[in-house]
Amino acid sequence: MELVSLFIGLTFVNNVVLSKFYAVCPLLGVSKKPKNALNMGYAVTFVIFVASIVTYALYYFVLEPLKIQYLDLITFILVIASLVQFVEMFLKKTSPEIYKAMGVYLPLITTNCAVLGVALDNISAGYNFIEAAVAGLAVPIGFTIVIYVFATIRERLDIADVPASFKGTPIALITAGIMACALAGIAGLV
Amino acid sequence: MKKFDIFKKGLFVENPIFVLLLGLCSALAITTTLTNAIGMGMAVICVLIMSNVIISLLRNIIPNEIRIPVFIVIIATLVKCVQMLMNAYTPALYESLGVFIPLIVVNCIILGRAESFASKNGVFDSLLDALGMGLGYTFAVVVISFFRELIGTGGLSLYNPFDASQVIFDIKIFADYSISLFTQPAGAFITLGCILAFVQFLNIRKENKAKKAEVK
């Protein structure tokens, strides 16, 4: 039951994109077409899930016994960079169209704050292994939901009559702000 | 004169946040108070200057194919040093910035400058570029936090980062009429959206003027 509330809490109530601002760059960059947004969501889900398990194991089974916790940042970022490289090679081989559509944003998953952020949060929140795995799944699912909903809203914004100064990124940011208000409304849920 | 241009472009023309839209995650998250914004700006300036200088020194040694992983490891090392120093000397600031200090590693500004400037230019130019970009970032977060703190709490305050009990100034202007939404995440998005709209407004006006001048 606690795991369920942890999952719902991280997916909706404390959604990382709209409450902690992780991954705002891809949110603004890849959210022009809903389909691309979904593909980005899948790739990020895979990377975050595996990264949170691997970094957790590395921290508690390698860094802590050796008392070299200060190397956490360097270790984590290397794990993440190699995972992203793997996803890139996998997509290039299996579905070149998706690979092309995601373009530069695919290697940029490395610098997606959400990946490193979840890995660091898992350690600082003192989660056990199962909780860290659940967090590694809940956070990217929350990210995928937000980026998909955001992309569909932006599609409609394109044909809306927005004042010239607000066209493009400014109105997108204000939309994100209103979405954050909506999510803050269910803050009492968990 | 040319050296000065390298320094100047990060401040306004290529401001990392208002124009290039890089590093928005931290810029939105830490701008709840002026003190946090200035502290974060200083941390970013330190990391950016050191990473640009080191990468510029090593630019002829690093093999081209693996340059990105090398850059990231250098940046991660520097960020960890800054994090440990801040934990030791500015504990209050360290607490309130929290996870966003280690997240400087994945701040696109740092890697972006390493890739597009420091890996191609000399040491002194890279230093100037880092200083300009870092000050541009600080300027942007200070502007965002100015509006957020003013509207969200009805006043402005600044604390000494090395000693949290020491208040530099703390003014309350309209404390009874504050809109607390602006201290929350939603307010950050809306504030930055409005500031970017203002930047776009200035650009459009400039273009229109240029067009009118052409017609004449």
Image (cartoon, helix red, strand yellow):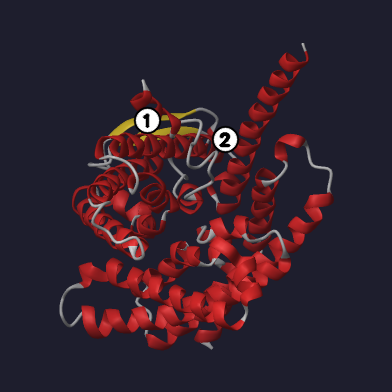
Image location (x, y in percent) of residue B130: 34, 39
Q: What element carries label 2?
A: helix
Q: Identify the chain of the residue marked 1, using the numbered disc in the image.
A: B
Q: Which residue lies furthest to the top in this view?
A: B216
Which quarter of the rendering shows the N terminus of chain A?
bottom right
Q: Mark 2 points at which residue?
A: B176
Give the crowd class for mark 1: few <14, some 14-19, many >=20 residues within 10 Å: many
Q: Are marks 1 and 2 on the same chain?
A: yes
Q: In this view, does B196 lie above or below A63?
A: above
What distance separates the C-alpha of mark 1 from that of mark 2? 42 Å
Q: Identify the chain of the residue marked 2, using the numbered disc in the image.
A: B
Image location (x, y in percent) of residue B60: 25, 52
Q: Which of A7 and B77 is in front in this view?
A: B77
Image location (x, y in percent) of residue B175: 53, 34
Give the crowd class for mark 2: few <14, some 14-19, many >=20 residues within 10 Å: few
Relative to A83, A21 lies left or right: right
Q: Is mark 1 on a helix, strand or loop?
A: helix
Q: Name the residue under label 1.
A: B7
Q: Is residue A98 above or below residue B2?
A: below
Q: Which of A25 and B94 is in front in this view?
A: A25
Say what amino acid the circle numbered 1 marks: Phe
Quadrant of the image occupied by residue A79: bottom left
Q: Nearer the viewer, residue B79 or B184?
A: B79
Image location (x, y in percent) of residue A58: 29, 81
Q: Which residue is drawn at 28% across and 67% down?
A: A74
Q: Which residue is drawn at 65% across and 34% down?
A: B200
Which quarter of the rendering shows the C terminus of chain A?
bottom right
Res A146 seen here: no
